[in-house]
């Protein structure tokens, strides 16, 4: 009898520890509006509930593209390669397609404008050995930084899923990664994407334009009314379509609005 009681307690503990999950197949309307395949994960912290669209794809790994600027910032700050929010690198004079990239950048502007060249130089200064050590210690995606120290997140071997993006962001929010308080606080400051009297969105876009099968991301979290809502959207397309960049953000905005998180 005692053994049965122990088994029951262990089973109850295991079940009660699992998060709630709600599948939202109806969110396909937001993806269909732009004509892209993809997935969406939303996690409500206070209610310990996951909302997922296209659940199978939520667990599939894709190249992180510029969403890797989040861990790259943390690692750069922790190693001292980046000295602070105002750490500046001089523009190399090479004209790039995005005009805001063609200027000197500090950490804040490089994150805001997603200046690839800035973060490539940061990665080179971190070096492969230290980068690999941190990517392993934070358990980031498949942890494979093959493909070049300044390219592995653009067209190299590293991959991460939408589900893993959420878990990574949760660890950042709870400060459960091997970084200092200062490092976390600086990242938190530069991640502000939108802010008003009702909520604050901290987020990062990503777009793997160098891949034959393009991948788009928008990942982050919303702080509102003493609660936090983590989100990760992933879209993909075999060809370059004009609304690809816009779609990641609009899909997210529509879902957050429907859920009355950013209404």
Image (spheres, helix red, strand yellow):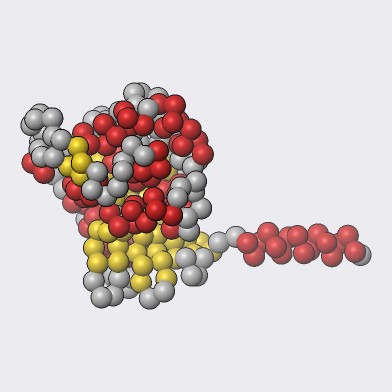
- Quadrant of the snapshot with the N terminus: bottom right
Pick the residue in front: 38 or 177.
177
* Position in image of residue 14 (x %, y %): 68, 59
Q: Residue at point 41% right, 74% down?
A: 226
- Determine which quarter of the picture holds residue 147: top left
At 30% from the left and 66% from the top, the residue drawn is 200
Q: Is residue 263 above or below residue 108?
A: below
Q: Position of residue 133 (x, y in %)?
A: 48, 33
Picture quadrant where residue 254 is located = bottom left
* Residue 30 seen by the camera: no
Does 241 sit left or right of 41 as displayed? left
The image shows residue 263 at horizontal and vertical percentages of 27, 73
Please tell me which residue is depicted at 33% across the width and 53% down the height of the picture: 186
Give the image location of residue 137, x and y in percent.
Answer: 51, 39
Query: Please, is residue 262 above or below residue 170 in the view?
Result: below
At horizontal 48% and vertical 70% (from top left) the residue drawn is 46
């Amino acid at each position: 009898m005692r053994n049965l009681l122990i088994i029951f307690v262990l089973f109850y503990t295991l079940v009660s520890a699992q998060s709630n999950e709600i599948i939202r197949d109806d969110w396909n309307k937001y993806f269909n509006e732009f004509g892209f395949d993809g997935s969406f994960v939303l996690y409500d912290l206070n209610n310990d509930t996951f909302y997922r669209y296209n659940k199978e794809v939520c667990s599939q790994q894709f190249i992180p593209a510029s969403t890797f600027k989040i861990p790259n910032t943390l690692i750069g700050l922790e190693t001292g390669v980046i000295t602070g929010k105002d750490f500046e690198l001089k523009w190399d004079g090479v004209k790039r397609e995005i005009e805001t990239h063609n200027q000197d950048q500090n950490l804040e502007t490089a994150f805001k404008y997603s200046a690839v060249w800035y973060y490539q130089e940061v990665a080179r200064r971190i070096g492969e050995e230290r980068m690999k050590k941190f990517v392993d210690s934070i358990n980031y995606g498949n942890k494979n930084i093959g493909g070049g120290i300044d390219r592995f997140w653009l067209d190299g071997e590293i991959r991460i899923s939408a589900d893993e993006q959420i878990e990574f962001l949760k660890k950042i929010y709870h400060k459960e990664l091997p970084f200092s308080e200062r490092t976390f606080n600086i990242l938190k400051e530069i991640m502000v994407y939108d802010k008003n009297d009702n909520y604050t969105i901290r987020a990062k876009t990503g777009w793997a334009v160098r891949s034959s099968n393009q991948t788009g991301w928008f990942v982050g979290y919303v702080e509102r009314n003493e609660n936090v809502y983590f989100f990760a959207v992933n879209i993909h397309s075999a060809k370059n379509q004009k609304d690809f960049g816009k779609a990641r953000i609009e899909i997210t905005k529509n879902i957050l609005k429907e859920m009355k998180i950013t209404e």
